[in-house]
Amino acid sequence: MHRLRRLALGLLGALLSACQAPQTPQAALPSPQRPIASLQELMRAVIDPSADGVWNAVETVTTKTGTEERQPRTPEEWIAARDAAMTLVEATNLLVIDGRRVGAQEFPAEAAGALDSIHIQQLLDARRPAFNAFAAGLREAGIRALAAIDARDAAALVRAGGDIDAVCEGCHLAFWYPNQVIPAFPSADDPHRPIFRAGTLTH
């Protein structure tokens, strides 16, 4: 009888010890996320096309024959605009995954005032919270575009498109071409100055 009691107490003690054993910290667990595309590839393959789908959904096109106001009118056109906006919104979650590199390979600066991939990466690593804030701003602008599409409100979609453009440009100015060089507009006596006339541009 005493042996059974000691055995029961031993089992109870083992169970209590197991329950009180320290659990593996969440931070020590491997991340289920594994970024494959670089930021450059993600921009080219997902962000840019989906943003274009939002911007191009409502536009004013002026040609020699007149001005055309374009906007989604059929259910299929609204669905296409919504798909673009939803893709853009979800893509912002891909932007903030840790470990995603700027480029699959190193690339040079594209223009005067722009940074090469090495310096973009250094800037991104040093200012990651700021980059994530831009991604969050892009997500919120995309959500406003979704709301405008669901309301079939072309004017609101234009405003949301402007917000998307502003966030993108702000991020690019911060991380891609912070030292951009904007050429001065040519003077009136410059022989190479473009000449604007009633809807045409000549040189």
Image (cartoon, grey):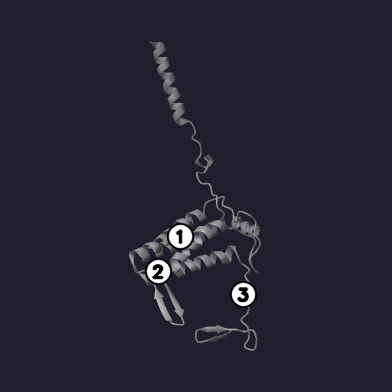
Q: Element type at marker 2? A: helix
Measured as percent of width and height from the top left, residue 32 is found at 50, 44
Q: Element type at marker 3? A: loop
Say the numbered circle drawn on residue 157. 2
- Whether residue 163 is visible to the viewer of this picture, yes or no, is yes
Q: Residue at x 62, y 88 (%)?
A: 188
Q: Seen in the image, is 166 located left or right of residue 190?
A: left
Earlier in the chain: of badge 2 and badge 1, it is 1
Distance, label 2 to label 3, CA atoms, is 30 Å
Quadrant of residue 120 in the image?
Answer: bottom right
Quadrant of residue 87 in the image?
Answer: bottom left
- Quarter of the C terminus within the rendering: bottom right
Earlier in the chain: of badge 1 and badge 3, it is 1
Distance, label 1 to label 3, CA atoms, is 29 Å
Where is mark 1, residue-wise? 88
Q: Is residue 35 above or below residue 48?
A: above
Q: Residues within 10 Å of mark 2 (few under 14, many from 20)?
A: many
- Quarter of the N terminus within the rendering: top left
Where is mark 3, residue-wise? 182
Earlier in the chain: of badge 2 and badge 3, it is 2
Instruction: Mark 1 and mark 3 in contact? Answer it, CB < 8 Å.
Output: no
Q: Which residue is farthest top?
A: 1
Query: Which residue is more in the foreground, 138 or 21?
Result: 138
